[in-house]
Image (tube, grey):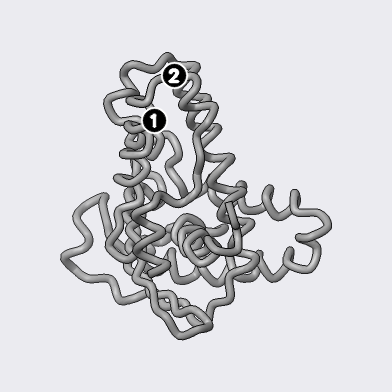
Amino acid sequence: MNCLVRIPTLALLLLAALSFVEVRAENAAGPDEVVRVATDELLGLITEHRSRYRSDPEPFFRAVDESMSQFVDYPGIARAVMAAHWGEASESQRERFIRTFRHGLVRSYARAMVEFDHREIEVLPLREDHVRGDRAIVRMRVTAANGRTYPLHYSMAKLDGEDWKVRNVTVNGVNLGQAYRSQFASAMRSGGGMDQVIENWSTAPPDDLEKATDA
């Protein structure tokens, strides 16, 4: 895979997955404020590691991983991606898929984010009809250096009274969770069994997402 071709897509997804760096939803902070403050923190993290990334990327990967772990519901996302196959999987297979999904997501998107040249990142005002109890949708608009804009929608949830966490992302109208779910189902239909699908799992952007962002 030519990573340079896919950098814009990967970087956009990283923004979506990592817009929650070192920020807690304290004092009843709304999900949009969490995103707004955390995005600034993320950009600072990238700036901090950019100069050393080429020679030693591991510290950046670890920092990104630590940040994502606070605000991304990996078990929930993995279960949604596996869908009906979650019930067929053993506990060991479930845990391996969660680890594989997390590892690949962090490294693929962190690597791309270092290369992404953005002009502006704007968290849009939270719409009243986008908050329903412990669920919310936060909208963001990313403008690339070439002037192209990308709408991002984050599906967020408060789980068991915890802080807001990411449950899904939509980029340019493409539902990432659904795309990965289709990818997993297709891999299972192709044969080889659960262990092989987990072993060969790829976090490269699904084809329909590539078309939506690279057209």
- Closest to the observer: 60 or 202? 202
Q: Position of residue 43 (x, y in %)?
A: 60, 70
Q: Position of residue 61 (x, y in %)?
A: 67, 50
Which residue is located at x 48 percent, y 57 percent? Answer: 24
Q: Is residue 69 above or below residue 57?
A: above
Q: Do the CB atoms of the residues marked 2 and 1 lie less than 8 Å apart?
A: yes
Q: Amino acid at mark 1?
A: Ala
Task: Name the residue carrying label 1.
Answer: 187
Task: Name the residue carrying label 2.
Answer: 192
What is the CA distance from the residue labelled 2 to the residue labelled 1?
Answer: 8 Å
Which residue is located at x 75 percent, y 49 percent? Answer: 58
Q: Position of residue 111 (x, y in %)?
A: 64, 57
In the displayed image of the protein, which residue is found farthest to the left?
129
Q: Amino acid at mark 2?
A: Gly
Which residue is located at x 49 percent, y 32 percent? Answer: 98
Q: Quadrant of residue 100?
A: top right
